[in-house]
Image (cartoon, rainbow, N blue to C red):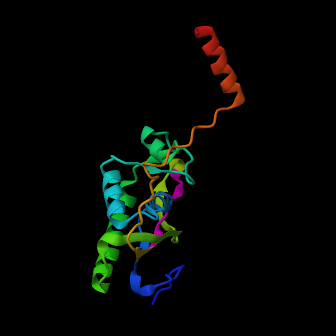
Amino acid sequence: MVRYSREPDNTTKTCKARGSYLRVHFKNTRETAHAVKHMSLRRAVKFLNNVVVQKEIVPFKRFNGGVGRKAQAKQWKCTQGRWPKKSAEFLLQLLKNAESNAEFKGLDVDHLVIDHIQVNRAPNMRRRTYRAHGRINPYMSSPCHIEVILAEKDTVVPKPTAPEDEPKKPKKVSKKKMQRQKLKASRDG
């Protein structure tokens, strides 16, 4: 049995899936996995499908050298992003596998949340490319290992709202702003 980097607290409410030596770029996959972390399973699948068709973007926060700025990245409070299609497809396959593991365990698929997702570098695969003057250079690929743990969360408690009969507190106004308002009132009146 393979070891995961983290073992879940309650094994009866969780399910796992992993992929090893996947031939997909490590850096892109790390950023995509970081974007879906702590999302519900349904939202993560929808997000990854949107990434494939470029409706939603994956923010690039760590491996962002040379990554262009995109307007869609604003929703992540970030400027740089891309749509790593292959990484999204690999993660979709992995989440589908984890979902079927959850169904086999008898978990409620609608309440599953991505509790843990991790991407590690795998050993580089080597090819060669031919250069000028009869030289040969390496042409390496950067595969990765991915592991996912889905956890079944209890019903989400909605955020409490303030009662309607309770009056709202007036917004605090600085001394400078009060003086400006008084001055404006005296000019108008």
Q: Can you give x and y, in whole percent of width and height, for residue 55 in the image? A: 33, 46
Instruction: Specify the quadrant that holds the N terminus.
Output: bottom left
Locate residue 157, reporting x and y percent.
Answer: 42, 66
Q: Which of 50 and 124 is in front in this view?
A: 50
State the image coordinates of residue 182 (x, y, percent, origin top left). Answer: 65, 19
Name the foreground residue: 52 vs 171.
171
- The question of residue 140 being in magenta is answered with yes
State the image quarter where residue 152 is shown: bottom left
37 within the magenta span? no
User: What residue is drawn where x is 66% and y is 25%?
Assistant: 178
Q: At 52% from the left edge and 70% from the top edge, which residue is drawn?
A: 120
The answer to whether one can see residue 135 in this image is yes
**Residue 110 against residue 11 in the figure, above or below:** above
The residue stretch that appears in magenta: 134-147
Q: In the rendered view, would you say 61 is above or below 115?
A: above
Quarter of the picture holding the C terminus: top right
Overall secondary structure of the magenta section: strand
- Considering every residue shown, the one lying at the far right of the view is 175
